[in-house]
Amino acid sequence: LALVVVKFFECAMPMMSFLSRSPATLAIFFLSRSSSSYAIPEYIQKIVQYNHKSTNAEVPTPPIARREEDRVIYAGIAPSGWDPQLPRQAANSTHELMDPPVPIPDPYGWLRDDARTDQQMLDYLNAENDYTESMTSHLIGLQDDLYDEFLSSLQETDYSTPRPKGDWMYYSRTFQGSSYAVHCRAPRTDSLGTIIDWDGSKDSPILPGEEMYLDVNELAKNQTYCNVGSVASSPSQDLVAYTVDYSGSENYEVHIRHLKSGDDIALTKTAAAGGGGGANDLLTIADLVWGKDDNTLYYTTMDEAHRPYQLYVRKNWKSENFTDTLLKEESDNLFSCYVDKSFDE
C-alpha cells in the first residue's frame, strides 16, 4: 500500500502543475518524460503537438458583450398602471409574489431573444463563434483525427432489433454517410422467430418486404437543426405519428403521416391547449401515444420551464371540429407528467 501511495504522488504531483504551464513548457515536460517509465497517451502527445504549433501565433482580441448597468427586471406583483413593456419576472406565476416588485440587475438582458432575430444579439454571437474558431484553428487536424478515430469504432450501416406489432415488424436503420436514422417496417411472418439474413450492405433489406416509412434525413434537408422525438404507428398501422424539433428549443411539432399515400399533416392547437387554431399555430408537445383507434391521440404539453405537466386527449384529430380534453395537470414543479403504452397495448 505504501508503494502504491508513493507511486501515485510521484505521478500526480507533476500533473498537478500541468495546467499552469504554457504549450512550449508542456512539450518540454512530455519530451522529458518520454524516455522514462511513463507511457504518454497518444492523444495527449497530439494535443501538445498541435498546441506547440500555435505558440507564436497572434492571439485575437475576444469580443466583449456590453453591459447595460441601468437595465433591470422586476420580481413581484405589478402595481396598477405598470408599463407592460418593462421586463418582469414571473408575470404569469400562480404563486404569491413580492409586493412591491423588487428590481434585479440584468446588464446582459439585451442578449435574450427567444425568436433569435435580434441583429445585435446575432452579431455578438457570430463574433464569439469567429473568435472561438480563430483560437482553435490550430486544432482542426486533431479534431479530424479524433473524429476519424471515434468513427472507426462505430458500425455506421446498422439496424435496431425488429419489434413485432400487429402484422408488421418495426425497426430503424442507419447508413454510412447519413446523419440520421431511417424508420422501417416489414411484414410479420408466422414463424415463431424472425431470422435475419442480412449481408451488411446498404442496399440489402434487413427483412423481406422492407418498407422505409420515415426517413429523418429527408426531414432534415434545408434545416439547420432536426431532432425527431416520438415515432408511433396507429392501431390500424396505416398511420404514423411523429414529433420533430426544427429549432433546438425542445418544442416538438406533431405530424401524422399516411403510410400508403405519404400525405403528411401537421397538427394545430386548440383553445383548450393554449392556442387559437390556424395553419401557423402548430401544436407543440413533449410526447404522445395513440388511443385505441386511429381517431384518438394522447399527448403532454410543457410549462415555461419545459416541464411536461399536462396530459390531453385529442378526439377526431382529422376533423376541423376536433376537441382537446385535459385529463391531468401536475401542479407540483418537482414532478413531471408523461404518457406511454405497455407492450401489450
Image (tube, rainbow, N blue to C red):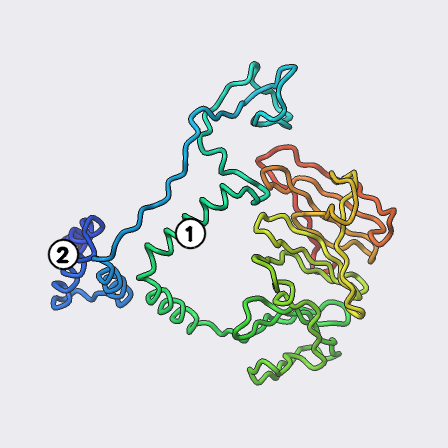
Q: Position of residue 77 (x, y in %)?
A: 60, 19
Left or right: where 237 falls relative to 146: right
- Please name which of the two marks, 2 or 1, marks the residue nearer to the observer: 1
Binning the other alpha carbons within 10 Å of mark 2 as few (below 14), some (14 to 19) or many (20 upward) gives few
Task: Check contact, mark 2 vs mark 1: CB within 8 A.
Answer: no
Instruction: Pick the quarter of the image with the N terminus.
Output: bottom left
Q: Position of residue 36 (x, y in %)?
A: 12, 66
Residue under the image location 15 percent in, 56 percent down: 25
Q: Position of residue 293 (x, y in %)?
A: 83, 57
Q: Which mark is residue 129?
A: 1
Residue under the image location 61 percent in, 62 percent down: 222
Above or below residue 100? Residue 317 is: below
Image-quadrant location for residue 135: bottom left
At label 2, the amino acid type is: Leu
Residue under the image location 87 percent in, 46 percent down: 321
Left or right: where 143 falls relative to 272: left
Image-quadrant location for residue 234: bottom right
Q: Secondary structure at mark 1?
A: helix
Of residue 82 and residue 259, the one placed in the foreground of this image is 82
Image-quadrant location for residue 159: bottom right
Q: Which is more N-terminal, label 1 or label 2? A: 2
Q: Position of residue 248 (x, y in %)?
A: 57, 51
| Residue, disc 2 | 3
Binning the other alpha carbons within 10 Å of mark 1 as few (below 14), some (14 to 19) or many (20 upward) gives few
Left or right: where 66 falls relative to 11: right
Instruction: Pick the quarter of the image with the C terminus.
Output: bottom right
At label 1, the amino acid type is: Asn
